Image: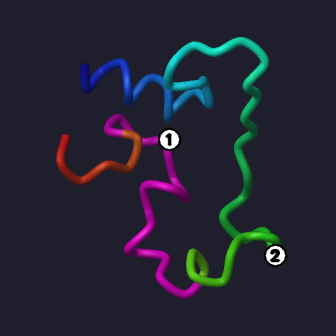
Amino acid sequence: DKNHIIDRFRNGKDLFDRAGELFRRTDANEADLPKLLRVERKRFLYMLNRSSRNAGFQDV
């Protein structure tokens, strides 16, 4: 279900509701981001900004 997936990405929850899986939101400007994400920001926007209604996915 698309809505379930979007909810998980937007709220940092595990996609399969596994216990003990913790996720934290990071600032897109953090130096510890992989270089590819920094260089190809538009390509990986869904990984960098999950706050929007569609969690950054283009096909929803």
Q: Which residue is mark 1?
A: 51
Relative to 49, is 38 on the left or the right?
right
Could you classify mark 2 by the number of other residues whose Cα lies within 10 Å: few (under 14), some (14-19), or many (20 or more)?
few
- Marks 2, 1: nearer the viewer: 2
Relative to 45, is 14 on the left or the right?
right
Relative to 44, is 35 on the left or the right?
right
Q: Which residue is mark 2?
A: 31
Mark closer to the chain start, 2 or 1: 2
Give yes or no for residue 53 being in the magenta stretch. Answer: yes
Give the x, y percent position of residue 24.
Answer: 75, 39
Q: Amino acid at mark 1?
A: Ser
Seen in the picture, residue 29 relative to 50 is either above or below; the reply is below
Q: Amino acid at mark 2?
A: Ala
- Could you tell me which secondary element the residue under label 2 belongs to? loop
Assign the N terminus to one quadrant of the image.
top left
Give me the residue at 51% from left, 33% from top.
10
- Could you tell me which secondary element the residue under label 1 belongs to? loop
Give the x, y percent position of residue 23.
Answer: 72, 35
Residue 55, quarter of picture: top left
User: Which stretch appears magenta?
Assistant: 39-54
Give me the residue at 38% from left, 30% from top.
6
Seen in the picture, residue 41 relative to 44 is either above or below; the reply is below
Numbered circle sitting on residue 10: none
Give me the residue at 81% from left, 75% from top.
31
Residue 27, quarter of picture: bottom right
Give yes or no for residue 22 being in the magenta stretch. Answer: no
State the residue in front, 24 or 22: 22
